Amino acid sequence: MLKLDLDQALVLRARQAAEKITGDFDWLFNAYSSVSIERTVLRLMGIDGATEDGKPCPNIIIEQLQAACALQKGAAFWVANAMLARNLSAQGVADAVASGELDLTAIPPQDASAIFELLQKLSAEMLSHIKSQKAARDEFFAKYGHRRVPAIYVIVATGNIFEDVTQAKAAAREGADIIAVIRSTAQSLLDYVPYGATTVGFGGTYATQENFRIMRKALDEVSAEEGRYISLTNYASGLCMPEIAVMGAIERLDLMLNDAMYGILFRDINPKRTLLDQYFARMINAYAGIEIQTGEDNYLTTSDAVDKAYTVTASQLLNESFALRSGVKPEKMGLGHAYEIDPELENSFTYELAHAMLTRELFPEAPVKYMPPTKFASGNIFKTHLMDAMFNFIGQLTGQGVQLLGMMTEAIHTPHLVDRSLAIENAQYLFKAVKDLSSSLELAPDSFVNRRANSVLAEATEFLEKVAGEGLFSAMAKGEFAEIKRPENGGKGLDGVFAKDADYFNPFMQQMKKELGL
Amino acid sequence: MTQIVKPYGDTLNDGKIQLSFALPVSADAKGKEAARVLILSMGFDEAEITCLRDLGEGFTHFIAYAASNASVDLSKIKVKVVETPVMDMEATEKYVEEHIGRELTVVGACIESDAHTVGIDAIMNMKGYNHRYGLERYSCFNAINMGAQVPSEELLARARAEKADVILVSQVVTQKNIHIQNLTRLIELAEAEGLRDKMLFICGGPRISHELAIELGYDAGFGTGSYSTDVASYIAITLAQKQGK
């Protein structure tokens, strides 16, 4: 059996440094909230819908409370207060605010214990729905069998949810285990979630609750026909992390992209906003039994995959530590990495093997997410197809959790139906061909692969210890991650972060923390 | 002098071409014949379906070889390509010092809906791409990379404020020709604001060619396989020539 001889003392040191780094944010998690967290609370209370010109109800309510300087108490209080005073449902309150006939802060405070009771009731209702979705997923897996390892993960990205459904069903029938609906390219920086079914998007399809529902229904149908549970994933990233997480929980998505630092580094979203939002978003993911997936592959698209391999390891350890603080269990942590080494480098495959084994062995319980070659994919589709095969070889050989299939047309366009089918055929061939090969192999003592994995680990440890010494925000401001400088008070969305009052109340977070043992 | 060429398989002028496509038909004899007839209707002389793969949902993938009788006269082909020679970083720096004698300001961005910075980063970031440093590293450039999803208005405002010599725009997402719309919008705004002739407008991306760039009203376009050295040399030489006039 292929196995590294990792320096366990280094592993321990690296984890301790990561813990120290992520442990520095209790002040943020405890004392602050954000507009996106409050919109999430409204969605959890059952508020949805949008005005005719497309403005979502949760945004309208939060803007009204913000304008009245009342958000510090939390959105839940104000809506519950209005529900009691006007004898309306949560949606009824939202509609009245949206039509401009209700000013939430003008309503006199109702009996505090009645408000508390109402919020407990609303919380219990929604959380029991989310739990029933989790149970449904567990039942499907029990009935149809576990997901294969590595799972076959493919994307659909037509921009039109109905076209996506056709392509997703075809992919599922051919063997895909996980369908990702790629988001429209402009969505990560929207400070709201679009509403309803959408048919126009660029480079992808908008993440909306209705789109989630449409795809989930279609995949449930294929699951039943194929006798295999087809998982659905989307992106809880950008300025609406917790909101999209909750939509995923409600509609039974099974995985969600959720990286603690991606938004900061690669989308220039404010560091405080991102860390705060990921904290609650991941808690929702954990509560709903949704597997999170992190975005370490992005480090390698901007930096060299050999020189900067340690940044992937360091980020994985930080993502792991942040996730634990939100109650995510190791078996639900799809930590990311990627096959991105320059194919012109001699022994590139050997390096890739070392890196893949390092990730696999550092996180033995995690359904690690392995990303395909993209940086050196080119218009030469034949060569890209070959690189994808080598990538699939390592995926099976080292038992990666989720194989995000490479497309031969990666560098050209969003995948055509045929491209995706050929990618699945490629993976199935390799997975079958080398299924049990690992059990016949062993690394030579003092082999290159062993030395390489340990040296990446050592670099990551050193880096994490340095960051632990100066603090994460300071390190980010200096550009120590991904060679991109992100100051603590820069980036988008800082104006959506606010300090909570002493009587702030978020019934959902409180209950989730309790049940997750946080 | 005319120079006629045809596709080459293994014999001169055999016209052989590989084809791969999907049709919304079932993977059976009828579907196969439909694919063959379709290929013949494209003007091929002969067509052989070598593989059909059932894609599900009523679609089939066909792989085929066909012989084409079409030919092309090379002597009649004219293309627009960036014609300036390519220099390495040191040579470009020296060239700018000698021929222009001041720092050149380049403002770059991935405009409008496009969130994919790989292209602009490969050209501009200090680190560059594939052993070629980005413009930020060049001593002769004041390189400002505004990043992703920058509205055209903001890019132009910044370029005006910085008295930019060059605007560099990247477009990676091309679904439904969104890149054409975005690039056209930028150039129209630049013309409306009277900035078009005050600076070089350069665009780049996997689906952009010099020819397309010219057609859209840009000075130059750089497609797949272009490096920072290509862009830097073009900027240096073109601006030096303009200054010379």
Image: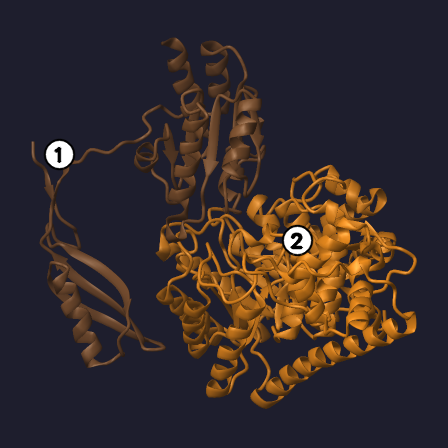
For marks 1 and 2, give the CA distance.
Answer: 55 Å
Circle 1 packing at 10 Å, graded few (<14), some (14-19), many (20+), is few
Q: Mark 1 sits on what residue?
A: B75
Q: Position of residue A180 (x, y in %)?
A: 53, 66
Q: Amino acid at mark 1?
A: Ser
Q: Where, quadrant-wise, is the C terminus of chain B in this rendering?
A: top left
Circle 2 packing at 10 Å, graded few (<14), some (14-19), many (20+), is many
Query: Residue A68, relative to residue A249: is it above or below?
Result: above
Q: Position of residue B115 (x, y in %)?
A: 53, 47
- Number of marks in the rendered image: 2
Q: Quadrant of residue B69?
A: bottom left
Q: Position of residue A86 (x, y in %)?
A: 77, 71
**From the viewer's perspective, is the residue at label 1 or at label 2 nearer?**
2
Residue nearest the observer in this picture, A238 or A151: A238
Q: Mark 2 sits on what residue?
A: A239
Marks 1 and 2 belong to one chain: no
In terms of secondary structure, where does tag 1 sit?
A: helix
Position of A185 with respect to A475 (left or right) is left
Q: Residue at x 67, y 44 (%)?
A: A492
Q: Which numbered marker is on residue B49? A: none
Chain of the residue where label 2 is placed in the rendered structure: A
In terms of secondary structure, where does tag 2 sit?
A: helix
Q: Quadrant of residue A327?
A: bottom right
Chain that is coloured brown in the picture: B
